[in-house]
Amino acid sequence: MAQERRSNKKTFSSAGGLTILYTSGMTNNKAFGSLLSRIRKERGFSSAHQFFKGAGGSKGLGLAFSSYWDIERGKKLPRSWRLKAIMAALGLDPHSPLARELVTEYFKALSGSDELLRILSAPAPAGGDLISRELAEAAIHQALAQRSVNLTIEQWKLRTRDTVTSICHSYLSNTSGWVTVRELSEATRFKPEEVRKALKALAAGGLLEFSGDKARSPFVGKVVKALPATPATAAIKAAQRTIWNKWVADSRLVDAKRMTIRMSKTGLDAYRQHLAKAVSLACIYENSAEDRQDSAIYTIEANIFRTYPRD
């Protein structure tokens, strides 16, 4: 079994007679740990212990809490496979800016500097193979990342406590300015007293402002990041799916496309990335301040089903 011993500057790993030496300055370890702690808070976990438990504990992350706590405090670095498990528990897309930032800091800590990383991240020479469409997509995704916000676990629980609360929050998040209880009632077909009760609860949870008989959302023009998939959030995500599956099923279908095709796992993974981009790029057409008499709120869904062979 591989064994490790640490000093302030180096980590030695030996297995099967093969010894590998990593230079790992304590300062860089702390920079990595600080970034990991910041991302963990941004993803809705107020403490390291809350995240550790939510990720399934030692079984989910492959290490004890004391070891994880040492990582956040910059006392040591995780193995690469453990970093992958941590990123998955945080709900980080491997291709997202946050994931790249964390991995970059990880390799800086391992190498002791960013000299080699600068070579990899240097801009390609003129005439590179990035076409204008890809550059435009990259610019749009960067803009979306800057507009992204996170909700706390408690806010997610409130948002998904029932259908009225969830739908009222969604409507307000996509509508600029003040919205009256009457308008919300007419748009959703919920009773005014149901709407008013939901708005009071959302306001108490910091998810909107409610004054008199009207409300407005602080999330208009923002992109609320999806709740990470962990054991601690499973029930919340299940409630969210139940609410929205029923709501969308009862909504008017505007358009649909379908194709059945055989492809490899590699091809599927590549296509999924294109599909995810296509869905998120719908944000460039968003206008929450549009005349409400001449606009509507649309839900865009993309599903891929494995149809054959049957499970």
Image (cartoon, grey):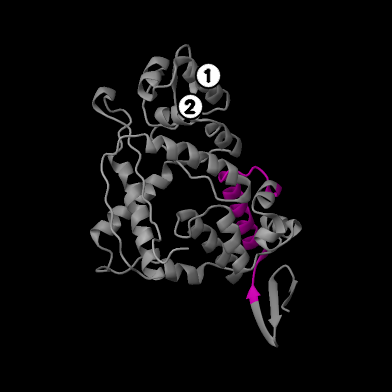
- Residue 92 seen: yes
Boundaries of the magenta span: 22-49
In the rendered structure, the answer to whether residue 85 lies left or right of residue 15 reads left
Image position of 137 with respect to 249: above or below: below
Q: Which structural element holds mark 2?
A: helix
Q: Residue at x 65, y 49 (%)?
A: 54
Q: Nearer the viewer, residue 106 or 293?
A: 293
Q: Which structural element holds mark 1?
A: helix
Q: Residue at x 29, y 57 (%)?
A: 135
- Residue 140 seen: no
Does 26 lie within the magenta span? yes
- Name which quarter of the figure residue 138 lies in: bottom left
In the rendered structure, the answer to whether residue 228 lies left or right of residue 5 reads left
Local crowd at mark 1 within 10 Å, few (<14), some, or many (≥20)?
Answer: few
Question: How far from the left and from the top, in percent, is residue 268?
Answer: 38, 65
Image position of 92 with respect to 218: above or below: below
Q: Nearer the viewer, residue 308 or 119?
A: 308
Q: Which residue is mark 1?
A: 197
Question: How far from the left and from the top, in percent, is residue 93?
Answer: 48, 56
- In the rendered structure, which amino acid carries the disc numbered 2? Val
- Name which quarter of the figure residue 264 lies in: bottom left
| Label annotation for residue 265 | none
Question: How far from the left and from the top, in percent, is residue 297?
Answer: 33, 32
Q: Residue at x 26, y 39 (%)?
A: 254
Q: Which residue is mark 2?
A: 164
Q: Nearer the viewer, residue 31 or 132?
A: 132
- In the rendered structure, which amino acid carries the disc numbered 1? Lys
Q: Nearer the viewer, residue 22 or 15?
A: 15
Image position of 101 with respect to 220: above or below: below
| Inter-mark Cα distance, 1 to 2 | 9 Å
Say if mark 1 contacts mark 2, CB within 8 Å. Answer: yes
